[in-house]
Amino acid sequence: MNILLLVGLAALYIALALLRPVDHDESQYVAAAVLTAHGLLPYRDFAYLQTPLQPFLLAPIAVLTGAWTWPALRLTNALLGLATVAFVHAAARAPAPAPPPRASAPPCSRPPTSCSSASALRATTRSPPPASPPRSG
């Protein structure tokens, strides 16, 4: 990825993180990170309607930033979004892996003129057994 494009995206993400209005769900995420940082557990000690990974991952940031937790978590999410864009871009530009080698057909034991795929198929295909006559009883 072009470094200038990456720096531009970083500036955009950081500006959006600091300037956008507060989302109603955001307070729950910040509160969950702060409560988890203080030793409380989601679901057991407080209601949390999402999966529990985010509060545990963001709790150390809440401990380090104290009263600045809200903007710090916004910046963290902006940088994680930027990292996601960079990784997806790198994965999309990576060369595709080489296809596995194709298995070759077993050699034919008959003369080459009779070794067509149709004759090989007929030689390996069996017909169903004849039906038995109905029993009279």
Image (cartoon, rainbow, N blue to C red):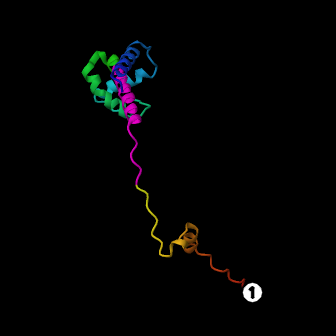
Which picture quadrant has residue 46? top left
Q: Position of residue 115 (x, y in %)?
A: 53, 71
Examine the residues drawn in magenta and state their main secondary structure: helix
Neighbours of disc 1 within 10 Å: few (<14), some (14-19), many (20+)? few
Of residue 20 and residue 92, the one placed in the foreground of this image is 92
Residue that protrudes farthest toward the bottom in the picture: 137
Outermost right residue: 136
Q: Looking at the image, which is closer to me, 78 or 11?
A: 11
Q: Verify whether residue 71 appears in magenta.
A: no
Residue 28: x and y in percent read 41, 24
- Which residue is pictured at 68% across the width and 83% down the height? 132
Work out whether 47 lies above or below 112: above
At a point 32% along the width and 19% down the height, the residue shown is 72
Is residue 93 highlighted in magenta? yes
- Left or right: 89, with 59 as reference point: right
Quarter occupied by the N terminus: top left
Q: Amino acid at mark 1?
A: Ser
**How many tags in the picture?**
1
In the rendered image, residue 105, in percent from the top left (x then y), is placed at: 46, 65
Residue 72, above or below 51: above
Can you say whether 56 is above or below 21 in the image?
A: below
Vertical order, 64 against 103 (above or below): above
Which quadrant is home to the C terminus? bottom right
Q: Is residue 31 visible?
A: no
Residue beneath label 1, please?
136
Residue 7, image quadrant: top left
Image location (x, y in percent) of residue 78: 37, 22
What secondary structure is found at the residue carrying circle 1?
Answer: loop
Magenta region, residue range = 73-100
> Along the line of sight, which residue is nearer the eye, 45 or 37?
37
